[in-house]
Image: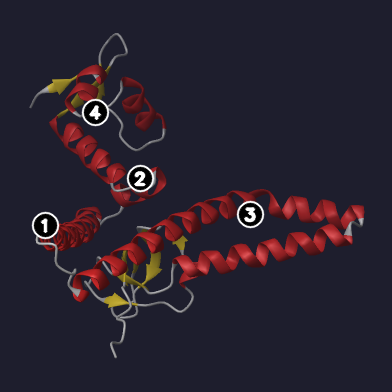
Amino acid sequence: MSNYTTGEMAKLCNVSLRTVQFYDQKGVLHPSAESEGGRRIYNDDDLTKLRIVCTLKSIRLSLDSIKNVMESQLSEKILALLLDEQMKTLSDEIDERQKQLEMITVIKESIARKTTNPANSILDVEHMMEKKKYSRNTKKLALIYMNVAVASVTGCAFMVWLITSRLWWALGVYLSMAVFGITVSAFQLKNTVFICPNCDAVFGIRRAFFTTGSHKVRWAKCPECGKKNWCVLRKQVPIKETA
């Protein structure tokens, strides 16, 4: 089994030296040993773990979620489910891009022949633009969600200060903003189901908003096996009815 320094680990995983040190400080990846001079020594298993961490970061999993997943007894199963969902997402994106290329080719050929664009192609282009608009709105809502999360940390102290200061109008504004934040957060979990790493059951939770975790994994109890663990989230795309 090979040994690696912090610098070698960083180079092999294409990350900075500070990133590897940061993961050590946060308890995500500790070195297996230390040299007599106090230098961190990593082995092949550590290298594999770092590559897994880098992969999870690339799919936008938070560092806390990564740590929780790595510490779980079913870490390998949870990782497999996360990667399966990411592969499905990428596959869907590739299919969508291929359809867009085909639409563009059809329209270009129609223009070259100086004929009218096929009606179906025009409708497909409009649909594509609607999806882009929806994607932009989703990103905006995600930003609002993060802002609300930060505000909730200091919200209780701020509300106490408003009450003690008897600034009732400000308290009313603050409570209105809190209700708005909860609504946005609930929207993020709309049409979302959970995948249990224990029994592979796919289930929904009415009170999903109150589960802890991130937009990728959440700590929840499976109604099928009755066990709690870090369940992987899957976004369900509503099927639109056609006339």
Distance, label 4 to label 2, CA atoms, is 17 Å
Q: Earlier in the sequence, mark 1 or mark 4?
A: 4
Distance, label 3 to label 4, CA atoms, is 38 Å
The secondary structure type at the circle numbered 3 is helix
Residue located 47% across and 55% down the image: 142
Residue located 46% across and 79% down the image: 206
Residue located 20% across and 70% down the image: 121
Res. 215 image quadrant: bottom left
Inspect the image, locate mark 4, and give the three-letter code of the amino acid beneath it. Ser
Inspect the image, locate mark 1, and give the three-letter code of the amino acid beneath it. Ala
Inspect the image, locate mark 3, and give the three-letter code of the amino acid beneath it. Ser
> Mark 3 or 1, which is nearer the eye?
1
Q: Residues within 10 Å of mark 2 (few under 14, many from 20)?
A: some
Dots 3, 1 in contact, CB < 8 A: no
Residue 81 percent coordinates (x, y): 21, 60
Residue 135 percent coordinates (x, y): 38, 59
Query: Viewer-proximal residue, 115 or 158?
Result: 115
Query: Viewer-proximal residue, 9 or 15?
Result: 15
Q: Residue furthest right?
A: 166
Please give the residue where the numbered disc 2 appears in the rendered image: 67
